[in-house]
Image: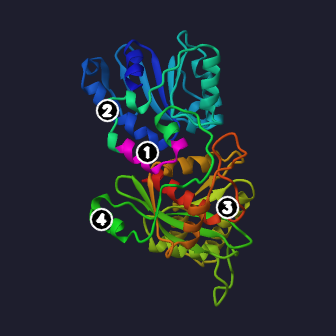
Amino acid sequence: MLIVLLYYAYHGFAAIFWCSQASQMKQPMRYMKQIVNGCFLKYAIAPGKLLTQSVEFKNGGTLFIGNLTEENARSPRCDIKYYDEKALADEKAVEASEPELSVSSLAKIINGSTPQKGTVFEDDYVRLRRSNKPILSREWWEIGFMNLGVIKRALEKSPGWFFRQEYECSFEAPQGRVFENVIFGDFSHILSGQQSRAWARHHLHFGLDWNPRAGHYIVGSRWSDDYSSNIVMFERNLGTIIRDGDRDGGEPDVLSGVIEILRQNPKSLLELEDGGTNAGYCEMFFRELDNMHKHNEISQQVHRMIEDRVYRRPWDSAGKNKMASITLLLPRIIYCDERLTPEVGRWLDIAHWDEESTEPKLDKDPDQHALDAYLHSAWVGYEEE
């Protein structure tokens, strides 16, 4: 699709390559420089205008690679745009981007994605099919550069519906067990192999799920060097108290536990579950953090360290963010030692799809807080490294 957009930009049009997630921008940015510098296009570039995310040609044509957010989508105007992995796109950001073609005589849109049911991409697919508009699909066996070893492993380890969705262009509604890609038991040999290459070492990252009844749960995981697997490494029940003002023999509280964990893991990040009633807990977390600094219970350095390394991500009512985390993990191996993380291990084993849902959706259980915390940890680790 970069080649298509570069073609239009070379002829004087303004083109935008929208990435649904910030982490998806790295590959097209790398490809753009390789393509432009490897052909005649390098002679058509305006001086000094081949940048990390954009290129401008001497005739005024442009190509911009951006992260599709509401804020980013409101200002640009263009003649042609491509939505990459649109199934993962935020619907409000897509709506905000609609006026971008309003002043163009070309006004061309190209939608691309791995199919997922219940998404804005499926809506586009159905609309285009009903209108007899052109739709191009390519299954794995039609792609010459596809790695057959990857296909074989996916067939062996992925649920059938997931393989059909990811490799055979099929909109699927799954049922049954969610995580069929978990290897239980001692993973120390896997971890030591990763850590022997210090320059490529990934870090432990954490997720926290709120549960005022049984205790707020924090889980830590880390990715393998090549992102082919994720390793569950830590779980802890932080109790039900956000902050205990009695620093002499008081009950364990969430803030003290988080500060201790982040101090012990200086390059780690923490993602809090936000949205709905969870938003109140997130607000309380940062408010009490400010109070700790105000009353000199923590230094300014510690206060800033927590604020800079703790993020919020909502579990929306439609379950799209949770499904994005699950989809991230399904084509990879999950290593879990039930002796170290028994709660996460239990939920990875019993989590199942909602059979009454018309789209892929995890069946909600009121006690699956350890699983949700794990999904947050895997997501923030993948997005930020």
Q: In the rendered image, which residue does mark 1 sit on?
A: 155
First reached walking from the N terminus: tag 2 or tag 3: 2
The residue sitting at 58% across, 28% down in the picture is 75
160 inside magenta stretch: yes
Q: Secondary structure at mark 1?
A: helix
| Disc 2 versus disc 4: nearer the observer | 2
27 inside magenta stretch: no
Q: In the rendered image, which residue does mark 2 sit on?
A: 145
Q: Secondary structure at mark 4?
A: helix
| Disc 4 versus disc 1: nearer the observer | 1
Q: Position of residue 54 (x, y in %)?
A: 40, 29
Part of the protein shown in magenta:
150-162
Q: Secondary structure at mark 2?
A: loop
| Disc 1 versus disc 2: nearer the observer | 1
| Amino acid type, mark 2 | Phe
| Amino acid type, mark 1 | Leu
The crowding category of the residue bearing disc 4, from other C-alpha atoms within 10 Å (few below 14, some 14 to 19, many at least 20), is few
Q: Is residue 266 above or below residue 357?
A: below
Q: CA distance from mark 3 to mark 4?
A: 37 Å
First reached walking from the N terminus: tag 2 or tag 4: 2
Q: In the rendered image, which residue does mark 3 sit on?
A: 282
Q: CA distance from mark 4 to mark 1?
A: 25 Å
Q: In the rendered image, which residue does mark 4 sit on?
A: 193
Q: Colour mode? A: rainbow
What residue occupies the far bottom of the structure in this picture? 249
What residue occupies the far top of the structure in this picture? 105
Q: Position of residue 105 (x, y in %)?
A: 55, 9
Q: Is residue 301 above or below residue 223?
A: below
The residue sitting at 64% across, 90% down in the picture is 249
| Amino acid type, mark 3 | Cys
